[in-house]
Image (tube, rainbow, N blue to C red):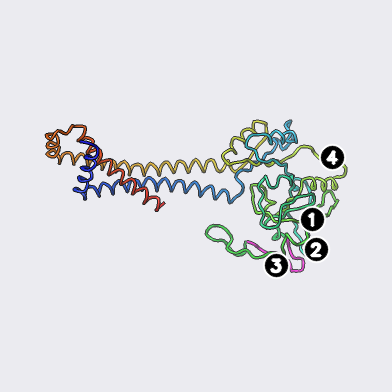
């Protein structure tokens, strides 16, 4: 028998036993759908977790701090920044200075005759040349480009109280609209003014001395707590400008050449763990979203394997169904097999015929199952 004759007989036999063929095909189809859909659910869970973490902030940012809060032998200085900057997979590096680290009082004034006052706020300084590479995103306006430019946090305006209104009803509560099922505010009321277009002044008081300076706001940052709370309800300015303000308050004392915080931007989330390990080997402490993402990803992989295993069981059962069908077919077709042998067919041709029937059922069931499972997934 040639291959053409075997294929023709295979099709004829499958048509002659339509009910059995369709039921076996259905078993394969369900098995394929089960494994594809189960794996798809696992992949969807992993992507959902990554999206949830991404909403919390940039997953490729590493916060580097010196051990013992900078009092140890290993300093986080410009030399260390240079080493980190030349590491593989590092996209950008910037020192960060937080005004909250100093014992000072921070006030912000806005509007005509200082009508609006914020008694507290987060003020931070970074190297503004690294803003784009660090991945800071804006709601409106443009990035700070030169000394004196300042970016406001997304919700900074809600920190201000209206001095023309009575105490207790002189602020705008951005959480007053309640929360939806996703945990986000249902409706956010407008603040008293637009922080990006209204002149704002910064007043810092330290050791009985005050320094007040007008700010040139160029844009509004998108909230990203991984980079710092200043992206939400604070100010971000050039680190050199912030150092100058501190020097004016502290007198002629020289600023510390080391840093307490450094932000490192990695090219891709898959390299965060490796870069963190390399930085820790230098003697510094690190923190990032990787400590949260890695166990969540591991758990998602385990669930995906479990779901895939359940789908594989269904497919295995379908394969047993094909085997059982073929064994029953052989038992019922002994007379047909005898006639074929008496006509001169080799045993290998008869074996190939039955294997072709089983393969055709598996192939058709698998193709239909893939199409159906793709539509469902």
Give the foreground label among 1 and 2: 1
Specify the label residue 215 is tagged with.
1
- Check disc 2 and report its element: helix, strand or loop: helix
Q: How many marks?
A: 4
Q: Main secondary structure of the magenta part?
A: loop
Residue 251 falls in which quadrant of the image? top right
Kindly check if marks 2 and 3 are in contact, taking CB atoms under 8 A apart as contact. Answer: no
Residue 262 falls in which quadrant of the image? top right
Q: Which residue is mark 3?
A: 169
Q: Is residue 108 above or below residue 59?
A: below
Q: Is residue 377 above or below residue 357?
A: below
Whole-number angstrom distance, CA of label 4 to CA of label 2: 33 Å
Position of residue 36 in the picture relative to residue 68 (left or right): left
Badge 1 or badge 3: first in the primary sequence: 3
Q: Residue at x 70, y 33 (%)?
A: 83
Residue 66 on image: x %, y %? 70, 36
Q: Nearer the viewer, residue 123 or 30?
A: 30
Q: For the residue carrying disc 4, how many other residues have a C-alpha within 10 Å: few (<14), some (14-19), or many (20+)? A: few
Badge 4 or badge 1: first in the primary sequence: 1
Q: Which residues are magenta?
A: 160-174
Give the foreground label among 4 and 3: 4
Q: For the residue carrying disc 2, how many other residues have a C-alpha within 10 Å: few (<14), some (14-19), or many (20+)? A: some
Whole-number angstrom distance, CA of label 4 to CA of label 1: 24 Å
Q: Which residue is mark 2?
A: 114
């Amino acid at each position: 028998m040639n291959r053409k004759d075997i294929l023709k007989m295979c099709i004829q036999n499958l048509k002659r036993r339509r009910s059995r063929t369709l039921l076996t095909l259905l078993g394969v189809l369900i098995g394929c759908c089960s494994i594809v859909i189960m794996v798809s659910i696992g992949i969807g869970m992993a992507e959902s977790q990554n999206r949830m973490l991404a909403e919390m902030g940039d997953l490729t940012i590493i916060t580097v701090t010196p051990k013992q809060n900078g009092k140890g032998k290993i300093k986080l200085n410009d030399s260390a920044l240079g080493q980190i900057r030349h590491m593989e997979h590092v996209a950008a590096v910037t020192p960060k200075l937080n005004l909250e680290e100093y014992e000072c009082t921070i006030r912000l004034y806005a509007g005509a005759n200082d009508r609006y006052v914020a008694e507290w706020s987060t003020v931070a300084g970074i190297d503004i040349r690294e803003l784009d590479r660090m991945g800071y995103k804006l709601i409106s306006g443009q990035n700070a480009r030169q000394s004196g430019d300042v970016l406001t946090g997304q919700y900074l305006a809600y920190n201000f109280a209206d001095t023309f209104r009575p105490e207790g009803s002189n602020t705008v509560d951005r959480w007053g609209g309640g929360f939806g099922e996703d945990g986000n505010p249902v409706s956010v009321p407008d603040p008293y003014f637009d922080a990006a277009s209204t002149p704002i002044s910064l007043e810092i008081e330290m050791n009985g001395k005050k320094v007040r300076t007008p700010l040139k706001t160029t844009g509004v940052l998108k909230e990203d707590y991984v980079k710092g709370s200043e992206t939400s309800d604070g100010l971000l300015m050039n680190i050199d400008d912030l150092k100058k303000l501190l020097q004016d308050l502290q007198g002629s004392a020289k600023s510390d050449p080391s840093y307490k915080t450094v932000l490192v931007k990695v090219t891709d989330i898959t390299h965060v763990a490796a870069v963190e390990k390399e930085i820790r080997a230098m003697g510094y402490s690190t923190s990032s979203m990787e400590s949260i993402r890695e166990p969540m990803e591991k758990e998602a992989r385990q669930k995906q394997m479990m779901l895939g295993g359940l789908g594989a069981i269904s497919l295995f059962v379908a394969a047993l169904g094909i085997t059982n069908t073929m064994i029953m077919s052989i038992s019922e077709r002994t007379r047909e097999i005898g006639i074929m042998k008496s006509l001169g067919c080799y045993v290998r041709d008869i074996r190939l015929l039955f294997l072709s029937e089983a393969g055709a059922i598996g192939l058709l069931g698998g193709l239909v199952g893939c199409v159906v499972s793709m539509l469902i997934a």
